[in-house]
Amino acid sequence: MSTDAIVLLKEDHKRVRKLFKQFQAAGRNATAEKRRLVGQILEELTVHTYLENEVMYPEVRKLLPDLEEDVLESYEEHHVADLLCFELSTMSPDDERFEAKTMVLIESVTHHIEEEEQDWFPKVREGLGRKQLQELGARMAELREKAPRKPAQPGALKKAIDALTA
Ligand SMILES: [Fe+2]
Ligand SMILES: [Fe+2]
């Protein structure tokens, strides 16, 4: 089995996109199905974002300074996705904002995945080469076991809430 980091990340993307399609195809009243799908989406995204944040992004930033801007923009897109994931994790499908919030998550993550796959992952492949990508992928595969599976309350939001309730 390949441990090429980009191959592994694209496999994650594929699973996430499949779940997105299933959510979009679920009927208006398929509440239990949607709850299950969103649960899976949140878990997949939490693990995936963690692996990119901890392994892929810092390494790309260090080794390929030309991609600094792409990496910084991607961190911000992860941050937006984290916020939406955390909010969704506290909501029930009966909530009138559940469907809308999930759709915004799907749209923004789909855009983000396209940018990774089409804009800057190809440059990473060119810049790092086979061996380094294999090593990065092996590190990610190992870290996957320890990765968080549930969205955490984002740091900035938590600080604001703590300050209000102190
Ligand atoms: Fe990403
Ligand atoms: Fe990704």
Image: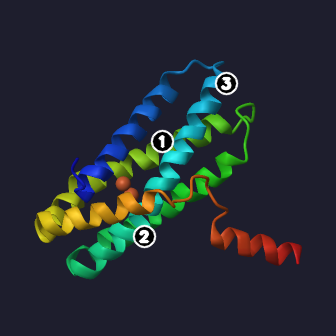
- From mark 2 to mark 1, how far is it between C-alphas? 23 Å
Give the residue number, with chain letter if any, for mark 1. Answer: 106
Residue 26 appears at what percent x and percent y? 54, 21
The structure residue drawn at horizontal position 72% and vertical position 70%, both measured from the top left corner, is 158
Q: Secondary structure at mark 1?
A: helix
Q: Which mark is residue 32?
A: 3
Report, in whole angstroms, how far the alpha carbon at label 1 lies from the one at label 3: 19 Å
Q: Earlier in the sequence, mark 1 or mark 3?
A: 3
Q: Badge 3: how crowded within 10 Å, few (<14), some, or many (20+)?
A: few
Name the residue rendered at 46%, 66% in the picture. 76
At mark 3, the secondary structure is helix
| For discs 2 and 1, the disc positioned in front in the rendered view | 2
Query: Is residue 132 toward the left or the right of residue 32 in the image?
Result: left
- Residue at numbered disc 2: 54
Q: Which structural element holds mark 2?
A: helix
The amino acid type of the residue labelled 2 equals Glu
